[in-house]
Image (cartoon, grey):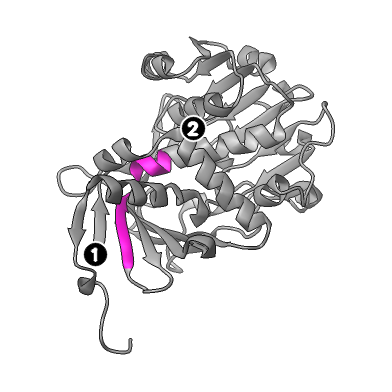
Amino acid sequence: MTLILTNADIERLVTMPECIDIIEDGFRELGRGEASGRPRSLNYSPLRPGEPDDYYALTTCDAALPSRGIHILRITSDRMAIRRADGRERRTKLAAGPGGTYCGLIMLFSTETLEPLAILQDALLNRWMVGATSAIAARALANPSPRRMALIGAGWLAPTQALGHCAILPLQRIDVYSPTRAHSERLVAEIQPQVGAELVVVDDPRAAIEAADIVAVATNSTKPVFDGDWLRAGQHVGSVQVMELDDRTHERASVIVARAAEAISYWHPETFRPAEVDQFRRWQPAWDAKLRLLGKVLVGAQQGRASADDITLFGGSGTGPSAGVGIQWAPAIVALERARERGIGVEVPSELFVEEFHP
C-alpha cells in the first residue's frame, strides 16, 4: 500500500529534533560517499507573452539512501511572480491552484520493490528541513557556545530558523528584524512559547548583526538585505537563498559551505528566460578555494572553521554551486514510520502506481 499524508498529518508525526537527527545522518552518509543527492532542477514556462515576472516552474530534486532502502523525490508545481512594493522586490509563490492552493509533493520509493511507499504534502517538511539544515550547519561552523543570534526576515521560512537553532544551540537571545515590524512581532508571538531564548523585535538590522554570534537570514528578497561590511570576526552567517546576500559577505567569509557541489540546473524555452536564472548564478571563481561541502565537514573530511576569528558562511539556494538536495527531505521517512505505527493517513493500493508491462 502507498500511504498519503497531508501537512496536518505530518505536523502530528515529526518534531524538529527528529528532523535535525535524520537530516544530519543523511548529510553524513553523503560525506562518506554512502548516499547520493541530486540538487534542484527547475524547468520554466512563460504564462503570458511579454510578462517575464509571472511564470510557471516545475522543480525537482532527489536522493538515494541505500541504508534505508529508500529513494526520495521532491517535486513542486509552482506559479512564480516577482512583486515590488515599498522599494523592495520579492520572489513569490502564488496560490494559483484550486481554491487558492499550492502544489508540492515528496515521494518515497522502495529501492527493493520499486513501488511508492508514501506521497506526502511538502510545505511543513520543507519549512522544517530548512531550519534544521541551517541549525546543523551552525553547530558545525559557529564558534562554540553561541549566545546571540540575529534573525533577518520574518516570513514563512524564518520561524524554523529560531526553532532549529534553539533545539541544538545554547542561544539566549534572538533579535528579529524585518522591514515590516508587524511581521517580526507575529513571529515572536508564535515562536517565543516554543524556545528558551528570548526573542526581541528590533528596528536596526545593523546593530542586531553586529551584536550576534550567528546571523540567520531567511527572506525572499531578490536584493541583498544587509552589507557584508557589517559583519565582524568570528561570526557565522546562514542564508536560505543567495540573492539576499551581497558579494562582500562572500568575500569576507573564510569558508563557504554548500549542500552540494553541483549547481542548480535551469531549463526554459529559448524565447523566455526568467531573471532569477542569472541572479542565482552569481558564484565567482575567486571563491572556489573557500568552498566546502556540509557532509564532508560533518564527517571531518573537510575543514570548516579554522580559527575563532573566521567568518563562516552556510549558503542557501544558489550560493556557489549549492542547492537544495533531496537528502533534506529525509524527515519524510520518520513521518512514514510514525504514520504506520499510529494508523494515520490514507492508504492507496500500490498497484495503481506499478505496471505489468516493460516501460
What's the residue at 66%, 26% (across, down)? Answer: 227
> Percent x, y for residue 122?
34, 48
Q: CA distance from mark 2 to mark 1?
A: 39 Å
Give the label on residue 199, or none: none
Q: Which contiguous range is marked in magenta?
A: 116-127
Query: What residue occupies the far front of the structure in this picture?
Result: 341
What's the residue at 21%, 74% (across, down)? Answer: 351
What type is the residue that disc 1 sits on?
Answer: Met
Query: What residue occupies the far left of the structure in this picture?
Result: 99
- Packing grade of label 1 (10 A; few <14, some 14-19, many >=20) is some
> Percent x, y for residue 253?
76, 36
Front residue of 242/213: it is 213
User: Mark 2 or mark 1, which has the lower sequence index?
Assistant: 1
Residue 236 in sight:
yes
Q: Which residue is mark 1?
A: 1
What's the residue at 78%, 46% (across, down)? Answer: 290
Q: Is residue 199 placed above or below 218 in the rendered structure?
A: above
Question: What is the secondary structure assignment of the residue under circle 2?
Answer: loop
Image position of 30 (left or right of 334): right
Front residue of 32/314: it is 32
> Is the C terminus in the top left, top right, bottom left or bottom right quadrant?
bottom left
Residues at discs 2 and 1 in contact (Cβ within 8 Å): no
What type is the residue that disc 2 sits on?
Answer: Thr
Give the label on residue 219, or none: 2
Image position of 339 (left or right of 141): left
> Which circle, 2 or 1, is nearer the viewer?
1
Q: Magenta includes 108?
A: no
Indicate the quadrant where residue 148 lies. Answer: top right
